[in-house]
Image: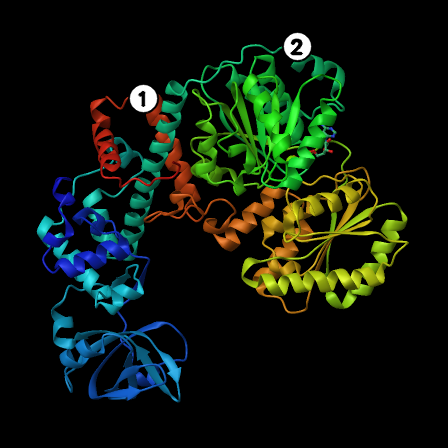
Amino acid sequence: MNSNFLQTPITYLKGVGPNRAETLQGELGIHTYQDLLNLFPNRYLDKTKYYKVAQLQRSSADVQIVGKIINLKTVEQKKGKRLAATFVDDTGRMELVWFRGQKWIRENLKLNVPYVIFGKCNWFNGVFSMPHPEMELLEEHKKGLKVFMQPIYPSTEKLSARGITNRVISKLIQQLFIETKGNFSETLSDGLLHELKLLPKSESLLNIHFPKNQELLAKAQFRLKFEELFYIQMQLISKKMIHKQKIKGFNFDQVGKLFNQFYKEHIPFELTGAQKRVIKEIRQDLGSNAQMNRLLQGDVGSGKTIVAVMTMLLAIDNGYQACLMAPTSILANQHYAGIKELLDKIEISCALLTGSVKKSARKPIHEQLESGELKILIGTHALLEDKVQYKNLGLAIIDEQHRFGVAQRSKLWHKNSFPPHILVMTATPIPRTLAMSLYGDLDISVIDELPPGRKPIKTVHRFDSNRLKVFQFIRDEIKKGRQVYIVYPLIQESEALDYKDLMDGYESIARDFPLPDYQISIVHGKMKPADKDYEMERFVKGETQIMVATTVIEVGVNVANASVMIIESAERFGLSQLHQLRGRVGRGADQSFCILMTSHKLSAEAKTRLETMVQTNDGFEIAEVDLKLRGPGDIMGTQQSGILNLKIADIIRDNDILMTARHHAIQLFKKDPTLEKPEHLVIRHTYAQLVKYKNIWNYIS
Ligand code: ADP
Ligand code: MG
């Protein structure tokens, strides 16, 4: 069946009227035959087994039962009405209930006629009841297509309320197979089909919707997952190639005076091998005539800042300006201070621009930026304001990119006639395969080595009941001259309560660590930026020994003398957040500690998170566990990415298939970059169709 036919609007399918079409579009995004064909089941149910009412268990599995309805009544309840039916077989009775669509059901259900019902049973008030069962007259059921596994399609409340049940969807797909005779054109090359022993397209589609047996289902799934991931990889790779060819960038061909001078005379330490490698990768990009788009991943404390500084020097050496954008004003301030210190000995104009910079101070910044006098601008979102105009911005560095949206990233682009080189730095260690799929248009550099002499942070889990001992430990550490963070969770949904916890905690700490022996800083989101900065400043200078804070402290803050991180209610934090927080300590030469405080009540998942933290300091290992626990949709910064909206494949579970697909896509582009060879025609055609009908997912704008 040719693919144009599959673009037929879904209303033309027998059984789909305008109302159903609208619902299918709105709820499942099904506009065409093709869309319906690509609505893949979430799971399959065993339909070979029939239960008796007397066999029902108080478990939540779906069951299939044959029996009759002997009466039907409407029951008034607090909220609206429900329709209840008594359903019997020769072993007992149970109840069927409906909360929605009652009128239709009342008018259409037949009493005392055998039905096959299917659904989940609840144990309720001493009887089994099945809400919104799927029902089919036994007579029809016997005539119907024999499926041994019932596919379960994605559904929504609206769909079931409007009577578009799983069975209806199945019927529509059946109709589609009748109209097309189940004949669909192949979308992968013969070469791939042979090499990977893939099931042909038509057979795959048939078996995904109407599996003949377990083996064919597995083969169909493999083929369709492979195909989905293959074409995504094709898109990512070709996008990258186009980017390399077309998006011209400023060519930084000079490794000039400033860079060399800094490297030879002022660098405060020997670079690690990983830092050197990454700087080399960046230099290659900058001298390639194409715009750099690079993601720099490095665990907290791995030394990304120096890489940023040296990259900025390259820009300035070539006559351009550079900016660095950070997600919070605390972090922008800290970068500013740190970078100014590094650049102290070489004369470069560098300014800070955050929301709290006064109007009068902004004016000269704007002017010097436009005249080109100012070389480096560091700041927050304030850098994106329209008033901020550069003479020639050649490099934009974005720190901790998960806090910035894609739209903001592209805003920087429009500051220029030519796009600046972009370096995105992140400490969120996204596993490589995921990063590859998420940021297909970015090149990736990884700093996978910590500066020498770091002692691994010792992490322990303590229950709240041990607080006194923990406090004693804090006193001992402070006596040795160390500083301590105490962090409280702050979650939007429970903000008021969380602030109360924070303030209660602060008061109790203030009692246990009284003035004048102890000085305490407190920083949280409700404070004015100026007050925050002041409190932070005191801690940075060592005037206070304890910093009580919410997660504002999470990102990038660098106080080498702070060696103890206490995380309160640690069970409420996600793994990546815990890891980020822990990264605030362990920055100096002293042994550092992280203490995870929790109550005794812990979920299994929370236990896994805590155990993982205690066992390892490796951010990538932690990210893998995190990914397994939560799925990719939850990993910071990936939410907005459409790529996770896959139709059949699963980025984590199908990682192997992803790697295979990527391998073959790369091979294909190597062999035949323009897909001109006759044997690749089918791939070229399919790819063009996917792009044309937007059936390929939009990942990155
Ligand atoms: P992050 O990657 O978390 O941004 P930073 O750039 O803040 O890490 O570096 C963490 C600390 O390590 C800083 O105090 C920095 O001066 C120091 N540092 C960075 N690179 C090295 C190195 N090669 N040798 C010794 N110390 C280093
Ligand atoms: Mg940093």
Q: Is residue 24 above or below residue 137?
A: above
Q: Nearer the viewer, mark 1 or mark 2?
A: 2
Q: Secondary structure at mark 1?
A: loop
From this viewpoint, is residue 447 visible? no
Q: Which residue is mark 1?
A: 673
Across and down, in percent, residue 406 comes to: 45, 38
What amino acid is found at the position of numbered circle 1 in the picture? Pro
Nearer-the-camera pick, 507 or 603: 507
Assess disc 2: are there few (<14), some (14-19) or many (≥20) residues with their C-alpha within 10 Å of its C-alpha.
Answer: some
Nearer-the-camera pick, 52 or 314: 314
Identify which residue is drawn at 24% across, 49% down: 38
Across and down, in percent, residue 664 comes to: 36, 31
Across and down, in percent, residue 82 comes to: 29, 82
What amino acid is found at the position of numbered circle 2 in the picture? Lys
Identify which residue is drawn at 69% across, 44% down: 530
Give the spatial CA distance, label 1 vs label 2: 40 Å
Q: Quadrant of the N terminus?
A: top left
Instruction: Determine whether, in the image, residue 110 is placed left or right of residue 546.
Output: left
Q: Quadrant of the C terminus?
A: top left
From this viewpoint, is residue 193 visible? yes
Q: Which residue is mark 2?
A: 257
Q: Earlier in the sequence, mark 1 or mark 2?
A: 2
Assess disc 1: are there few (<14), some (14-19) or many (≥20) residues with their C-alpha within 10 Å of its C-alpha.
Answer: few
Instruction: Determine whether, in the image, residue 329 is placed left or right of residue 219.
Output: right
Identify which residue is drawn at 52% across, 47% down: 636
Across and down, in percent, residue 165 comes to: 23, 66
Q: Quadrant of residue 514?
A: bottom right
